[in-house]
Amino acid sequence: MISSERIPNNVDLAGNKRLQRALEHWQPAYLDWWRDMGPPGFQDSHRVYLRTAVSVDAAGWAHFDFVKLPEYRWGIFLAEPTPDRRIGFGDFKGQPVWHEVPGEFRNQLRRLIVIQGDTEPASVEQQRSLGAHCPSLYDLRNLFQVNVEEGRHLWAMVYLLHAHFGKDGREEGEALLARRSGDADNPRILTAFNEKTPDWLSFFMFTFITDRDGKFQLAALAESGFDPLSRTCRFMLTEEAHHLFVGESGVARIIERTCELMAQHRTDDVAKLRGLGVIDLPTLQRYLNFHFSVTSDLYGSEVSSNAASFYTNGLKGRFQETTIGDDHRLEGAQYPVMEVIGERIVTRNVGAVTALNERLRDDWTHDLENAIERWNRIPEKHGIGFRFKLPHKGFHRRIGVFAEHHVSPDGKVLAEAEWTHRHQQWLPSAEDRAFVQSLMGRVTEPGKFANWIAPPRQGINKQPVNFEYVRFG
Ligand SMILES: [Fe+2]
Ligand SMILES: [Fe+2]
């Protein structure tokens, strides 16, 4: 028997027997999925120093202890309600928020929740091979922390489906455990979540870039007039911050290590650096280009009537909606989007309410640019002239106005032949990927790090860097 304490929660599960039974029914299916698709080789054999949320207050949301992965206590937590919260945007602006799903928006809301929910187990599936060749115990622990929290984010969405969408919701909850990243017959919903995460550089780029998409999607959903969705997303955002940290600091440590050897050997020669066992900066830039372009597509088309409808219906807002100084209805407002005319990329204004995908993509891009400026201080510190830069938003896109075109990283529209000839300079080649893969060893001695990555400046939860973050047995 699973008691309500087995599912830590602040939603009074014990007081809602019907819901408790539904979730208790889903829990073993979830655990089967976790054992099937979670990190192989680390299920019952290892204990991991993990943060578990046991409540949402400052003391309880980050409780650290050693746990076996399948025994992680995946819980259901909503941020505390805001008294007298009002819908902040769209046609219902100023009205009290909804605590139940408004019937006319049921399908739209379910779709939003399912799409968000689907990304969570997808990333666990994408990352499942990484434990076998970790660069350190510190990094291994961070990988598992991200994995268990993505699992908890799935719980967060399945809770909403079970609590508010009846039989349809329970069916969606099962479908979320049935789809598989990269599966030919039953793939995850969004393309980027069907890509492989085959090596640790890809993992760090993914958490830096794609988890940041998660941050912006969650922030937009945290504005929702459907209050349970808002509260769930607000709490998920506190966990997401760590995922972004893992990505940003992971790549920063790779840059640091490469720059150390560049300075020490006074070289930027790619072959020589690869011979020294570090990842040259141009290869890092190509990985950045790849992950940026693939993740850009997650925001959808620049102009979207769905996005407009989510907004006017009060379901999904803009990033930091409440801090924006306008009418929050976007009546008559314009927003610039790009389009390709002949060989030129031009900007035109469209109704802002139709351009909300583009706006969220732009907000995410600015956040990334700031983080990349922090990376750029590393080569600078070593007296190295290299600077990382995001490619043009039209580069290597599959969705939206650029999908039919080839655009270089600096924003030139290219003919097919030129793209074919040059795109290997801009995206990781098979050779780049093979080289990165060749570096992936398995370092499990506490305090030791693979040669291609610098140690972090500090450990997790004030533990030392050489702490035994993952223990056998
Ligand atoms: Fe997540
Ligand atoms: Fe995440």
Image: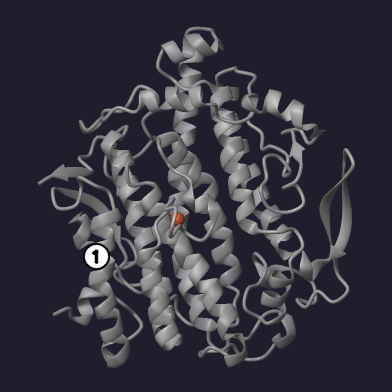
Q: Nearer the viewer, residue 298 or 16?
A: 298
- Of residues 178 and 263, the one nearer the viewer is 178
- In the displayed structure, would residue 36 be above or below residue 30? above
Q: Is residue 471 left or right of residue 206?
A: left
Can the viewer see residue 30 in this picture?
yes
- Circle 1 residues within 10 Å: few <14, some 14–19, many ≥20: some
User: Residue pushed farthest left?
Assistant: 473
The picture places residue 374, in percent across and down from the top left corner, at 58, 37
Going by the numbered disc 1, the residue's amino acid type is Leu
Q: Quadrant of residue 323?
A: bottom right
| Residue 26 appears left or right of 166 | left
Which quadrant is home to the N terminus?
bottom left
Callout 1 secondary element: helix
Q: How is the image coloured?
A: one colour
Q: Quadrant of residue 136?
A: top left
Across and down, in percent, residue 157 comes to 43, 72
Q: Residue at x 73, y 59 (%)?
A: 359
Task: Name the residue at 9% across, 46% down.
Answer: 473
Residue for point 50% across, 40% down? 205
Q: Which residue is mark 1?
A: 31
